[in-house]
Image (cartoon, rainbow, N blue to C red):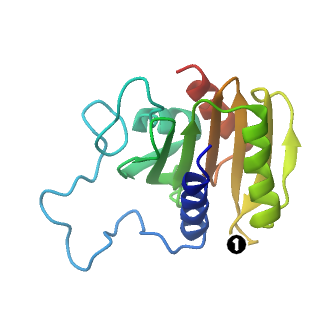
Amino acid sequence: MHVRGLTGLAVALVLMTAGCGRAADQSSQAGPPPADTATTSNDDGTAGSGAGDPGEPQCPSTSDITDTLGVTVLLAEDPTRNGDTMVECVYLGKKADGSSGSVALGVWTGQSHDDYLKFRRHISEDLKLATSDRSGIGDEAFTYLIGPAATPDNALWTRKGGVMVSIQCPVSLEQQVALANLLFTR
């Protein structure tokens, strides 16, 4: 387990939820983006560039995000890897009602029950977020709410076998489970 990756993802999730991240129609710099800036998914439908080795965890395609979460992806950021066992993926998009549908997720391989418990303790004890057990999702799962009280995002963490998935976005748990189940099959 790489706590550095978890901490980076947790910070990204908190910033995105707090509205500190880049809006879907803005770049991180003033003025228009440079002409060579990638603002959509790769030709193969994976997020950003550098999809990684096929044996490494992969970001889902933008069509997977749309099909499972109902979020139209406007920008798929480049994946962030931590070694060959973890990838963080961020998609900026809109839901069908026009509201923000930004998605942050992580996929880890080689994870055990003990690793899962360490992640959960980090979320509940270090980040002070109330978690709830969820049954029927992978081998084990928990959820929590994060963000402004009026419009919090759902967050799901689940493990099946050696694969652990975290998903945070403003959609239903059922939609998040659909994406997690898809990622477990890859």
Q: What percent of the width, then of the height, locates residue 52?
A: 35, 34
User: What residue would you read off at disc 1?
Assistant: 148
Q: What percent of the width, then of the height, locates residue 41?
A: 31, 42
Residue type at mark 1 is Pro
Furthest toward the bottom, the residue is 30
Q: What percent of the width, then of the height, locates residue 76?
A: 37, 49
Between 164 and 31, the residue placed more toward the observer is 164
Residue at screen point 21% across, 78% down: 31
Local SS, label 1:
loop
Residue 66 seen from this side:
yes
Residue at screen point 29% across, 30% down: 44
Q: On screen, 177 above or below 27?
A: above
Characterize the local packing of mark 1: few (<14), some (14-19) or many (20 or more) Cα atoms within 10 angstroms.
few
In this picture, residue 71 sits left or right of residue 10? left
Q: Please identify the quarter of the rendering in which residue 181 is found.
A: top right
Residue at screen point 27% across, 38% down: 42
Figure quadrant of the N terminus? top right
Q: What percent of the width, then of the height, locates residue 45?
A: 33, 33
Between 36 and 100, the residue placed more toward the observer is 36
Residue at screen point 51% across, 75% down: 20
Furthest toward the top, the residue is 185
